Image (spheres, rainbow, N blue to C red):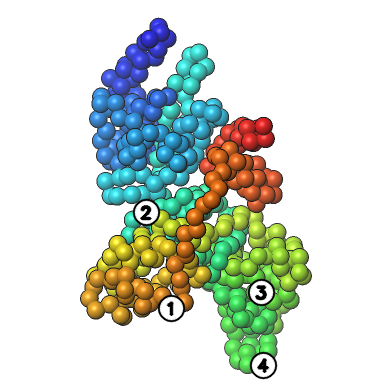
């Protein structure tokens, strides 16, 4: 062992011994649970908020962050997850990622921020890990929020968590039944506007006149049947969130008025000359490909760019295979009201093999039928098969050719950049790596 390594080990030992004094006091300056970690992933100190939220750590036994948080035997990036400490080493700057951590309360989503600390020689020696619990989704059973632990779901939660605190307009995209309304509610509940109402307008099936009346309100005599003044839903959403579900179905004539509302923040009730001012946060959702609707002339291009400030794509259930058991159990708990129904392992495995075109909504239908057909509180595979209708399990196709990792990574990065229209910062964020790491990987795959 070199003299330099001896000195570093002694420094770390001193820090660990001093964890109840200077270092612990330093960490107590943070408003969230925090730990001090060495470059080789050893936890050297914690603050009181960490102990309260996640439990005490036996520092002197050489606990590693990946063992304590995940139960892994190797760092996160070697276990298939993004590692903020490794990313911090690569970039030399602050890094952030959303993980699922083990806590005394079970699995929880945690927003992890990693801050690098350099020694007197300028080298990275220590890292402060700040942990903020995320409550907009659950990694355990829940009848109130979105549930899941899969990488695709974690990316969704991370996007929601990032944008919720801002007033940026959000466009939720995804197939029917993926939970766009739940995502909109999660954004609202985590925003500074959570104390005010979230008002939902179902855009599908509304005529232009009805849509305008619902949104803006109308005055007596504005049209046939307008027997009295009516406040619009914009009045109810004042200071809160306006959620336009299936925005792609808004009539073309109404799109102009909606654009004016977003651009000026003003509107008039139907039949009135009084200009009113609106104050709300806008969230829209659609199952349609709006860019294709713009190309075909069905949706205004200027409105599309107004509502698409922060797009979020909700993953279909087939990309969340690891979440199906958790989602199914949460649905059963909500349907039965007492959590009295249980799925057998074979029933869960059958559900995991299925491609649900209607996603979570279709899965819920299957489980609701299963409760009706089940002769007891145990739902076995025969009951589930009876409830499937025309849903068929996907057959596993044998893979004749296996690509090497470099080829797979190259294809993934190219597809991701195409999806992000060349925006490397956005691509790096979705991939869960630093921008510097993305440039390095792009250089590697091009060689």
- Label at residue 139: 2
Q: Nearer the viewer, residue 288 or 342?
A: 342
Q: Nearer the viewer, mark 2 or mark 3?
A: 2
Q: Earlier in the sequence, mark 2 or mark 3?
A: 2
The residue at 38%/65% (across/down) is 350
Q: Are marks 4 and 2 in contact (CB under 8 Å)?
A: no
- Label at residue 389: 1
Q: Earlier in the sequence, mark 3 or mark 4?
A: 4
Residue for badge 3: 250
Q: Nearer the viewer, mark 4 or mark 2?
A: 2
Q: How far apart, in angstroms, are the residues tagged by discs 3 and 4?
A: 22 Å
Q: Earlier in the sequence, mark 1 or mark 4?
A: 4
Residue 272: where, in percent of width, then height? Answer: 69, 80
Q: Are marks 1 and 4 in contact (CB under 8 Å)?
A: no
The residue at 57%/58% (across/down) is 313
Q: Earlier in the sequence, mark 3 or mark 1?
A: 3
The residue at 51%/70% (across/down) is 357
Above or below 22: residue 214 = below
Q: Quadrant of residue 309?
A: bottom right
Residue 200: where, in percent of width, then height? Answer: 53, 71
The residue at 48%/27% (across/down) is 116
Q: Earlier in the sequence, mark 4 or mark 2?
A: 2
């Amino acid at each position: 062992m070199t003299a330099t390594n001896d000195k570093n080990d002694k420094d770390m030992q001193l820090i660990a011994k001093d964890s109840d004094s200077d270092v612990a006091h330093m960490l107590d300056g943070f408003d969230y649970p925090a730990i001090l970690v060495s470059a080789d992933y050893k936890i050297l100190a914690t603050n009181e908020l960490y102990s309260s939220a996640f439990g005490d750590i036996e520092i002197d036994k050489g606990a590693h962050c990946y063992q304590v948080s995940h139960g892994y035997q190797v760092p996160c990036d070697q276990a298939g997850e993004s590692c903020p400490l490794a990313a911090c080493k690569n970039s030399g700057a602050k890094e952030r990622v959303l993980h699922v951590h083990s806590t005394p309360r079970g699995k929880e989503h945690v927003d992890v921020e990693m801050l690098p600390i350099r020694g007197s020689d300028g080298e990275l020696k220590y890292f402060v890990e700040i942990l903020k619990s995320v409550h907009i989704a659950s990694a355990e059973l829940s009848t109130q929020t979105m549930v899941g632990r899969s990488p695709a779901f974690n990316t969704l939660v991370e996007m929601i968590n990032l944008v919720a605190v801002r007033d940026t307009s959000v466009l939720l995209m995804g197939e029917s039944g993926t939970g766009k309304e739940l995502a909109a509610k999660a954004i609202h509940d985590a925003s500074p506007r959570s104390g005010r109402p979230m008002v939902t307008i179902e855009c599908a099936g509304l005529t232009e006149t009805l849509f305008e009346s619902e949104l803006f309100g109308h005055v007596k005599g504005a049209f046939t049947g307008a027997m009295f003044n009516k406040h619009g839903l914009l009045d109810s959403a004042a200071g809160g969130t306006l959620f336009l579900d299936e925005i792609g179905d808004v009539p073309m004539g109404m799109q102009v008025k909606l654009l004016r509302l977003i651009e000026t923040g003003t509107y008039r009730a139907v039949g009135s000359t009084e200009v009113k001012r609106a104050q709300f946060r806008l969230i829209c959702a659609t199952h349609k490909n709006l860019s294709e609707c713009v190309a075909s002339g069905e949706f205004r291009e200027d409105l599309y760019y107004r509502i698409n400030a922060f797009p979020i794509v909700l993953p279909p259930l087939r990309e969340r295979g690891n979440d199906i058991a958790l989602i199914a159990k949460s649905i059963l708990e909500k349907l039965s009201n007492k959590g009295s129904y249980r799925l057998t392992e074979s029933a869960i495995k059958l559900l995991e093999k299925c491609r649900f075109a209607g996603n979570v909504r279709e899965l819920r239908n299957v489980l609701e039928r299963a409760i009706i057909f089940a002769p007891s509180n145990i739902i076995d595979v025969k009951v589930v098969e009876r409830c499937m209708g025309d849903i068929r399990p996907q057959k596993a196709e044998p893979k004749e050719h296996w690509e090497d990792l470099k080829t797979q990574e190259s294809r993934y990065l190219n597809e991701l950049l195409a999806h992000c229209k060349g925006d490397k910062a956005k691509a790096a964020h979705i991939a869960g790596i630093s921008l510097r790491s993305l440039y390095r990987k792009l250089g590697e795959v091009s060689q």
